[in-house]
Amino acid sequence: MTQTPAAPSPEPQAMPLWRRLLGYIFDVRVLGVLGQMVFIVLVVLGVRTIGSNFADNAQRLGESQFICRDGNFSYRCAYDFMESESGFDIADTMIDHTNTDPYWKSFQVGVLNTLKVAIFGVILTTLLGTVMGIARLSNNWLISKIALWYVELMRNTPLLIQIFFIYFGVILTAPELNDALQPLGLPMFISRRGLNLPSLEFTSSASIWIAFLVLAAIQFQVTWVMLGRREERTGQASNRLQTGLIAFFLIAGLGWYVSSAVSDSQGLLVTKASRVRELGDLEKIMLQRTGANHLDDLARMPEEEVEDAAFQICAIEESASETNLTRQLSKLNVPYQIRRYERPDKATDSYASEKCEMFVASKTILAAERSTLESPSSHLILSVKEVPVVWSLPKREGLNLVGGSRMRPEFTALLLALVLFYGSNLAEIVRAGILAISKGQNEAARALGLTEGQRLQLIVLPQALRVIIPPGIGVALSLAKDTSLGIAIGFPDMYAVSYTTMNQSGRVLQLFVLIMLVYMLISLAFSVLLNWYNEKIKLVER
Amino acid sequence: MTTNEELTTPKAIGRGFNWQLFLQDNLTGSWMQTVTVLLLAIITGSYVYGKYEELPIVTAVVVALWILGIVSIIVSEIFHKPTAVSRWLKQNLLTSFANSLLTLFVVLVLVSAVNGIWQWSYVNANFNPAETAPEFRSANGATWGVLWGARKLLMTGWLEPIHSWRVWLGLGFILIMWLFTYITSRPALKEKLRVARMVLNGFWLLSPVVLYILLAGISEGAYNVTGTITGVAVLGAIYALLWSQKVIPFSWGSIIGTVVAWPLLYTIWWFIGNSGQFPPIDPDKWGGLLLTLIIASSVIVLAFPLGMILALARRSEVFGVPAWLIWPVAVAATLWGFTTTPELLATSRNLVEQIMSFWPVIILAIAYMIHRVFNGNIVAGVGTTFIELIRSVPLITLLFMGIVMAPFFSGEGVSIPKPWLVIVGYTLFSSAYMAEAIRGGLQAIPKGQYEASDALGFNGSQKMRFIILPQALRIVIPAIVGQFIGAFKSSSLVSIVGLFDFLGINRSIVSNPAWLGLRLELYVFMAIIYFTGSFLMSSYSRKLEVQLGLGDR
């Protein structure tokens, strides 16, 4: 780079000075550098023109955009407005959000929604794409043709039409909530209001169990590595996966029992007069109330009578405590009825006015609520046994569906369309990856006497993945970017939330910078992942 | 195989049917297989039962056919006389237990799906364009009349009917051009009609201008003399550049043609404009399929050359700006920038602003990037940055930026119709992807080709024009056509930013009382049109690949 440009002539001495100077100037390298400098000057001038246009227009069109609180004009106040109240509600939120929250909070909700769609989408697309890619190569003619038509149909129509079609044609033509479809009797419901699915709910003891899970994962890794070393040292084959999994599940199971035994955070508020001292007492009381000899006799009694006798329980909406308690009550076979309230104080009011006999929540909430009652000493907080993770199933209650988690129609439609569309792209990549393995590799593996499992695990997968993963990451990135299409059906992702913010505040530029930054961070993350993978799998060439 | 061996292995494969081997192959090979087959049997059985209650005749026929197929295979196996049908069935549909069950299941699912679509789209459907209002519609049938009723909106949007002849003329022009191109490219006529083909190519080059005149129109105006002289100068300069790089040979005919072309064409343009036959049409009136085609084809036409320039820029091997030139300039700029820091620091209100006060560090970072990552090659640096920036954001943000931000960055009092803004944003987006596709082709050319052309004494432009690009572009035809298809399909995104393209126009159609809520019919129709367009393009690309012998070398 520091080397001086050489004259093209072999005998510079024979030439007059001006020819030699001309030779220096017309050297390709010198011209190149000069050209690049002119280029840079042009770029800077172009940026300056646009910038000065912007400054003029900012003064004229959007003077209010850069006004600080104290009324001065300054570019540094560009994002001050983000701290003021947003004033709009967001339908689909993962964190609590009300319309009095600042714009920052709304933006955060949008980013989380984008990530939610992207993560679920990538997971489901991987599954669908793999299945469809393999189906394309199926020896069943019908299956491979269906997979082919699926891929062709999805790849040759715009994603946006697919989103609209699924939203308006599939989701919004589903039945109303009160006669939601229940496919194959599974605990899931499809209705115009979205998709109700079973979900996991974490009680407060879950943190202990998760710590145990981490330990178990470490144990798995340790077992894996140690057995691998022994294998290398002695040549003695061992089933590393199986041993590791056994170790993992031993510790995870131990953690389950420890965490449910140790923790004591779930409570049930009852009056002393009710004579309930532990959950087991409920059975006796129920038998007294109904006059039955055994709880199984309740099934033979008239329904209204059982309903009258059922325990009335207050709970807070969408709390794990409720799922935890009802699971145990169903096990005891005791009839009960739940009333759900948005806030603890409303549930307490209801409890105090004896609309319900019990109030279930975590002990800290109950202790706080008990002190607000008229005579705190006449109420007891019972301990309710808890498990770290409760499986909450959706079920019908009257005209409504309770329990589980509900995916909103917009989310369902967007997710479904993205998965179907990018699944078709991934299917082609998977198919190409599998076809890229030469026949000889498979034949050689069989000749070596590897079992089918070993052949797939040791020969086919490592080579196919090398071809599949780089473009696969590209598909994941496109999917993450195309979550922005959710705005077309009103899914509040980052782009849609920013769009609303723009319309309300008129700050277009600021929000665009923010959107671009977030998307660039996402693609940066993906490209870091890609580079890391490429570095890892790079063939060692001689 | 000796007789002895045959005696000791009586159950050898190929010597008749062996039920033990058959069971092992199909059912008892491993516990996984057993479970899979049993599970499939249960699912298929319950599904058949459920379907039988819903559609008894069809289900019975399907199951009967399925059993017939299995019986035919068994019979042909027993008598060692496979027919064409039974062999095909055995190889493709009824390969094993699991596959046979899967086939039955899938056929039943397909039958009920096809039946549902048939019921909706034909049996219960209403085809009368006059009967599209809600009171005429059947409960679960399509109302196809909307397609005919709304045909004008679907095709040309809000374009005034007095202008529709211009659209027809444009369509006719393109069709006739295609027809002639098809005829002249027949192998038998290819040599005889050389001149005709050259004229045709000239018309293809002019076709954007012709279509612009037809669809956008020209306003009347004074003869622009300076513009004409500038045009001649630009064309002449391009000619001189190409000639000096020895990419085109010098000939008097071509230089006269270059000099005359611009004034001639401009004069024709000016006459057409002043004749008043083609008054300007407001581009915001474009809509429907017309707008989709205008956007898609402009983007395709513009993004290809821009993408090529970007790809060449990214891979350019220009001698980089030396470090002794980069660093002093960068340090001087940084120092100059730091003079603003004390004031910024003094007025900063929070930590973020304090950190931002040290903004001149960015200049050093850029200098480092130019020096280290790009070896001082600024052309490659700018190309790479542009491509990567564009590729990291979704298309819709660029489209929106084109529409919303343009007034901020353009001069005062300039108002540009929406379609142009969208085309600019979309072209930037598409060219970045096109550049990556072309770069793939450039990288695929073996190094020997570059070295050989250097050894033959080709200069940079000649190397690209005669050696590298012809090979590279041929390799990336599938990728480029893929980008074209993407541009065609994704042009539907402009409906989100408020344009009434083929997809966006249905907003106005379904809000019309006569067609209220007839979304599905429109979506199906649009999907069919998009599918046809994309499918034609991809099959043309496959044909082109075969013609060019791609993959044979």
Image (cartoon, coloured by chain):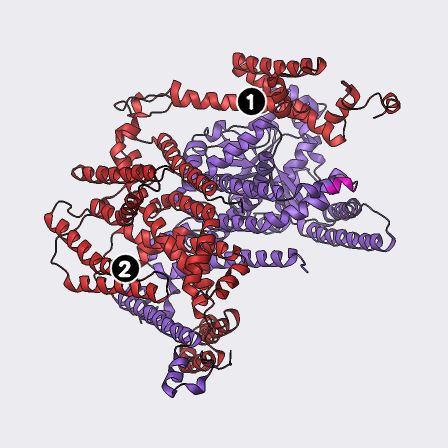
Chain colours: A purple, B red
Q: Nearer the viewer, residue B416 or A13?
A: A13
Asked whether the viewer can see residue A353, the reply is no
Residue A62: image quadrant is: bottom left
Taking the image as shown, residue B285 lies to the left or right of residue B534, namely left
Whether tag 1 and tag 2 are in contact, CB under 8 A, the answer is: no
**Could you tell me which chain the residue with mark 1 belongs to?**
B
Q: Which residues lie in the magenta part?
A: A444-448
Taking the image as shown, residue B18 lies to the left or right of residue B507, namely right
Q: Does A415 appear in magenta?
A: no
Label disc, if present, on residue B407 of the rendered structure: 2
Q: Give the amino acid type for the residue marked by disc 2 in the picture.
A: Pro
Q: Which residue is mark 1?
A: B107
Which SS class for mark 2?
Answer: helix
Q: Position of residue A191 (x, y in %)?
A: 48, 32
Q: Position of residue A8 (x, y in %)?
A: 45, 78
Vertical position of residue A369 compared to residue B370: above or below? above
Identify the residue at image location x=36%, y=71%: A44
Asked whether the viewer can see residue B254, the reply is yes
Q: Nearer the viewer, residue A83 or B23?
A: B23
Taking the image as shown, residue A369 lies to the left or right of residue B177, namely right
Q: Position of residue A30 (x, y in %)?
A: 42, 77
Query: Could you confirm whether marks 1 and 2 are on the same chain?
Result: yes
Q: Does A447 appear in magenta?
A: yes
- Ranked by sequence position, the earlier of labels 1 and 2 is 1
Q: Nearer the viewer, residue A397 or B189?
A: B189
Q: Mark 1 or mark 2: which is in front?
A: 1
Q: Residues within 10 Å of mark 2 (few under 14, many from 20)?
A: some
Which part of the image, by quadrant, shows the N terminus of chain B?
top right
Q: Residues within 10 Å of mark 1 (few under 14, many from 20)?
A: some
